[in-house]
Image: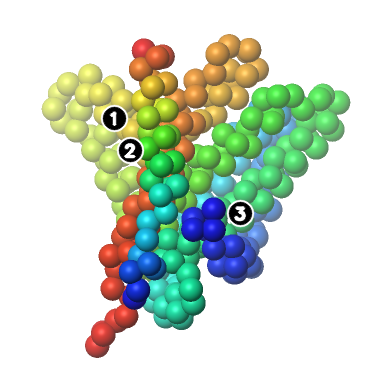
């Protein structure tokens, strides 16, 4: 485990990322949204629905923006890597630190939702318990992707590239089928879209409520996505020329 | 940069392979 994550680096990244004003504000908004979800529906399975989902997606992007690039560009990473520490464990430490901030914010919102449910004189059920890992695994997949992109893209442009690709994709998806005059392409592109990034794993929550067999596909896909991005980030960092001669 | 600092943790490669295989197996069994 020590080769995967350097915990001193993770602790420093956690401190740095959690002290940001925007991160704090988004965490409060997320908790408020989850609390009102619990109050309105009286069901814990709604913890990360609607506005709460929007807030944690934005929180993930803020946490991932420049996660690696900031340290490389200030030369801080190069200083830290003078210590007996592998690049892989430094990268893992940065990612784990940001992921822990994300987990803390999600857990606080999750508890707020539970309180909202109890305030409606209902008991939080198994579906409520499942919402936390389902939301975290998906968000962690995106965070790992942002971290890997941050090795090669400067400052916040890892988030910028992702938003640009998303906009380009939505433009293609909404325009191309009609330009080609064949509406069945809408379905084809919808099927492709599911595999372009970590998937929404919240269908498990509904399955737990109806006691039907949950589809673990999205959850496993997100875990594969997260570990593949983590691996790609380490490989990219290993190839990166950190000593910037004459630049 | 010393060579040992450029190592790739085997556990990470193993996890990636394991999750990808688990997902593929799940999709195959569900189909």
Q: Is residue A137 above or below residue A89?
A: above
Residue at the (71%, 47%) spot, across then down? A108
Callout 1–callout 2 Cβ contact below 8 Å: yes
Q: Secondary structure at mark 1?
A: helix
Q: Which mark, residue A192?
A: 1
Label 1 vs label 3, nearer the camera: 3
Residue for badge 3: A100
Label 2 neighbour load within 10 Å: few <14, some 14-19, many 20+: few
Residue at the (47%, 51%) spot, across then down? A143
Instruction: Report which quarter residue A107 is drawn in.
Output: top right
Q: Is residue A82 above or below residue A240?
A: below
Mark 1 belongs to chain: A
Is the same chain shared between marks 1 and 3?
yes
Residue for badge 2: A196
Disc on the earlier residue, 1 or 3: 3
Q: Position of residue A56 (x, y in %)?
A: 56, 47
Q: Is residue A151 above or below residue A227?
A: below
Q: Secondary structure at mark 3?
A: helix
Residue at the (22%, 24%) spot, across then down? A185
Q: Quadrant of the C terminus of chain A?
A: bottom left
Q: CA distance from mark 1 to mark 3?
A: 31 Å
Residue at the (84%, 33%) spot, across then down? A119
- A192 displayed left or right of A88: left
């Amino acid at each position: 485990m020590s080769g995967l994550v350097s915990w001193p680096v993770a602790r420093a990244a956690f401190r740095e990322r959690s002290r940001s004003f925007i991160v704090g504000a988004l965490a409060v908004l997320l908790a408020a949204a989850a609390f009102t979800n619990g109050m309105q529906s009286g069901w814990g399975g709604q913890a990360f629905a609607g506005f709460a989902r929007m807030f944690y997606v934005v929180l993930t992007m803020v946490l991932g923006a420049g996660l690696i690039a900031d340290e490389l560009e200030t030369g801080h990473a190069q200083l830290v890597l003078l210590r007996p520490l592998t690049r892989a464990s430094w990268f893992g430490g940065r990612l784990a630190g940001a992921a822990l901030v994300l987990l803390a914010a999600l857990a606080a919102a999750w508890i707020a939702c539970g309180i909202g449910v109890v305030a409606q004189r209902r008991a939080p059920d198994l579906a409520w318990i499942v919402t936390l890992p389902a939301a975290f695994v998906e968000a962690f997949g995106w965070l790992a992707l942002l971290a890997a992109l941050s090795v090669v893209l400067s400052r916040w442009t890892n988030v910028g590239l992702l938003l640009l690709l998303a906009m380009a994709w939505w433009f293609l998806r909404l325009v191309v089928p009609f330009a080609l005059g064949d509406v069945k392409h809408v379905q084809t592109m919808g099927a492709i879209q599911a595999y372009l990034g970590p998937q929404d794993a919240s269908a498990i929550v509904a399955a737990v409520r109806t006691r039907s067999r949950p589809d673990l596909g999205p959850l496993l896909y997100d875990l594969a996505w997260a570990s593949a991005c983590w691996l790609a980030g380490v490989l990219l960092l290993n190839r990166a020329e950190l000593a910037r001669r004459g630049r | 940069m010393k060579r040992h600092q450029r190592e790739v943790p085997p556990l990470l490669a193993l996890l990636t392979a394991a999750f990808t295989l688990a997902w593929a197996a799940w999709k195959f069994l569900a189909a």
